[in-house]
Image (spheres, rainbow, N blue to C red):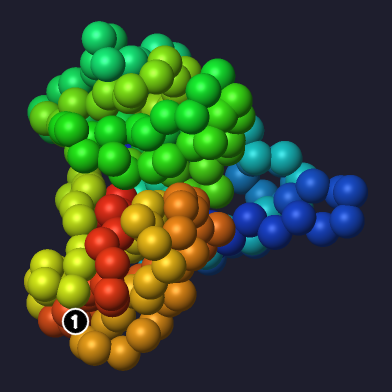
Amino acid sequence: MQTKSRHLIFIFLTAVVIGGMGYVIAQTPSEFGHPPSQIGPGTFYGGGDYIFPATSNLVVQGNLNVNGNIGVAGKNNVDVHFPDGLDGEYKNLRISSSETYTVPMGKTLYIMTASSQATSDLKITGSSYYHISGPKGISFESPFIVPGGETLDAPNTMYLTGIEVDTSVTPKAFMLSTGTSYTVPVGKTLFIHTIYAIDDCDITIDGSRYFHVLMGSDSLANPLVIKGGQIVSSNPDPVYVTGYEK
């Protein structure tokens, strides 16, 4: 039979490191554009962009070298910390009360590190969302998320690094309190990355205390997840959170 312009290729995309030997490739059927120049156990080489179906798993042993972009189709992004991926513009920002930065509409800024030579608050459009007792530098375990159209500033000079990407999820930055709750839309899931608490309090989901917060700021190693239709609030004091909804 003649070779067709589109090829069935067998790849399940779940990368597993085995000892010091690298990654292993196992093959299972899925269809995508032009095949790589070599496929099989060992090294995987590619010369273009490859999108793997959302249901795929790739188990790799050897080397995975793609001269292009590689991604997973559909809604199942493999990284809950960077749901928009890492194909964007890396940023080094200096902000203060007189030096502000506004995230462009249609973009989301993921801040990875922050440093201040004096105690300061990282503010989003005038409200404090993260407190740093300086002089101090921090690395966010879950990135601090700033939606498009919002403006960053700080009472004292802060230095930030991160990445700005096209938005495919709904970034969130909002305040919760006893009287100010948020209902996650049905069919969506809310992932909370960072929390700034005015005092010790609890984050509640449908009235039950799911996460105790000490006064100050926290970047969660794994996001706090709230399902669609659930109501999230804080008790008894306000908290300021960043995250996203998808």
Task: Give 13 or 176, whichever is nearer the viewer.
Answer: 176
Name the side, left or right, on which 133 lies relative to 38. left
Q: Residue at x 79, y 47 (%)?
A: 22
Task: Give 168 or 32, whichever is nearer the viewer.
Answer: 168
Crowding near the residue tagged with mark 1, few <14, some 14–19, many ≥20 C-alpha atoms within 10 Å = some
Residue 21 appears in the picture as rendered = yes
In the image, is residue 145 above or below residue 184?
above
Name the side, left or right, on which 201 lies relative to 60. left
* Percent coordinates x, y for residue 123 in the rendering: 28, 33
Image quadrant in which you'd find residue 56: bottom left
Under mark 1, the amino acid is: Gln
Q: Residue at x 89, y 49 (%)?
A: 20
Q: Residue at x 76, y 55 (%)?
A: 17
Task: Give 75 or 181, whichever is nearer the viewer.
Answer: 181
How many numbered marks are there?
A: 1
* Percent coordinates x, y for residue 150 in the rendering: 16, 31
In the image, is residue 141 above or below residue 34?
below
Which residue lies under the disc numbered 1? 230
In the image, is residue 236 above or below residue 60?
below
* Percent coordinates x, y for residue 135 in the rendering: 59, 25
Image quadrant in which you'd find residue 24: bottom right
* Percent coordinates x, y for residue 110 in the rendering: 37, 36
Q: Residue at x 39, y 62 (%)?
A: 199
